Image (cartoon, rainbow, N blue to C red):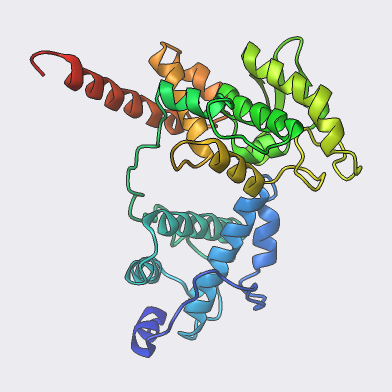
């Protein structure tokens, strides 16, 4: 009996997060994890967890190793995930993890063929990112306009610098959190950023952002980093430690006049550059995208903005 038939007959249930690694030597998930050494730590964790979830699901159908897996079984697994109401983006990531795993197995002779070659999953739903208009950006960055009563000056200086850099350089929140004092060259208005996959890039900041960072480093950081726990971190929280992702979210919540995710500032940065005539490859470099395809989503955003303006202003629209 094929293992896929056993799985269907026995009505096995899978896990959502993968849990601990499956310790069956035949699957060798630890070896697979080592093969992902050039990928970001978050990607390695996600891929190994995704494959571990599949191993548990398949093992309940008496599958003992990757050599017993066929393409039909993989497709049934992805269909099973769909019935469990996983987001399409999550299923797509799990399919990518399985492709990486079985390609690795095939290279090492564990399987006679690669059952996951070309394995596809439903494409994630196309969702245009939130983009702020000029007034919303001004309201966010202008601390005097927003209610800042009771906020200490050094906290205001930090918040100003954080928001100016997020919008002015288009950084991911994790990239901003990872900045050290030595990463800033304010005379040249540049920041050295470590992005996904530990790839470094140099980004530009405008004069206002450079002034905000300089004021924070000169007058704000010495106060908030007095505990000595910050190390070389450029931005610190109220406990004197490196600013975390949740800290950034609280800053945005405190200053934004509308509900807003911090990543929206990165979307806004890219879209405003394209609206102003910037070349797509320049925007790709500034954002740190490995593929131009990732950056192209912002061209769709700009087209939507143009259509909105056209529809609202042209007499015959």
Q: Residue furthest bottom?
A: 10
| Residue at (76% x, 32% y) in the render | 154
Q: Nearer the viewer, residue 37 or 237?
A: 237
Q: Residue furthest front?
A: 149
Say which quarter of the image contains residue 310: top left
Give coordinates of residue 10: x percent, y percent.
38, 89
Is residue 158 placed above or below 311 in the rendered structure? Answer: below
Q: Residue furthest left?
A: 316
Quadrant containing the N terminus is bottom left
Quadrant containing the C terminus is top left
Say which quarter of the image contains residue 143: top right
Viewer can see residue 205? no
Residue 137 relative to residue 308: left or right: right
Viewer can see residue 41? yes
| Residue at (25% x, 19% y) in the render | 309
Instruction: Give the number of callouts.
Output: 0
Give coordinates of residue 74: x percent, y percent.
40, 67
Say which quarter of the image contains residue 65: bottom right
Give coordinates of residue 163: x percent, y percent.
60, 30
Is residue 198 placed above or below 35 in the rendered structure? Answer: above
| Residue at (85% x, 41% y) in the render | 230
Give coordinates of residue 245: x percent, y percent.
64, 46
């Amino acid at each position: 009996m094929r293992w896929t038939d056993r799985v269907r007959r026995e009505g096995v249930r899978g896990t959502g997060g993968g849990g601990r690694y499956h310790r069956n030597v035949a699957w060798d998930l630890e070896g697979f994890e080592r093969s992902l050494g050039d990928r970001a730590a978050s990607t390695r964790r996600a891929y190994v967890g995704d494959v571990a979830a599949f191993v548990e699901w398949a093992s309940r159908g008496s599958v003992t190793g990757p050599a017993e897996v066929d393409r039909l079984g993989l497709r049934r697994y992805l269909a099973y995930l769909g019935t469990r109401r996983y987001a399409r983006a999550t299923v797509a990531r799990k399919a990518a993890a399985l492709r990486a795993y079985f390609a690795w197995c095939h290279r090492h002779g564990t399987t006679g063929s690669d059952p996951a070659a070309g394995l596809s999953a439903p494409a994630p739903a196309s969702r245009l990112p939130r983009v702020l208009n000029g007034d919303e950006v001004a309201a966010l960055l202008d601390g005097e306009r927003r209610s800042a009563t009771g906020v200490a000056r050094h906290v205001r200086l930090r918040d100003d610098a954080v928001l100016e850099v997020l919008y002015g350089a288009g950084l991911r929140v994790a990239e901003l959190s990872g900045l050290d004092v030595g990463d800033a060259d304010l005379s040249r208005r540049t920041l050295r950023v470590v992005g996904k996959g530990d790839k470094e890039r140099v980004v530009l900041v405008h004069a206002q952002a450079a002034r905000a960072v300089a004021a924070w480093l000169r007058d704000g950081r010495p106060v908030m980093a007095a505990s000595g726990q910050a190390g070389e971190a450029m931005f610190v929280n109220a406990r004197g430690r490196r600013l975390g992702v949740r800290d950034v979210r609280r800053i945005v919540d405190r200053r934004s006049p509308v509900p807003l995710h911090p990543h929206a500032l990165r979307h806004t940065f890219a879209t405003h550059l394209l609206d102003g005539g910037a070349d797509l490859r320049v925007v790709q470099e500034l954002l740190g995208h490995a593929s131009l395809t990732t950056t192209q989503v912002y061209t769709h955003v700009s087209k939507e903005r143009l259509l909105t303006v056209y529809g609202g202003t042209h007499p015959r629209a």
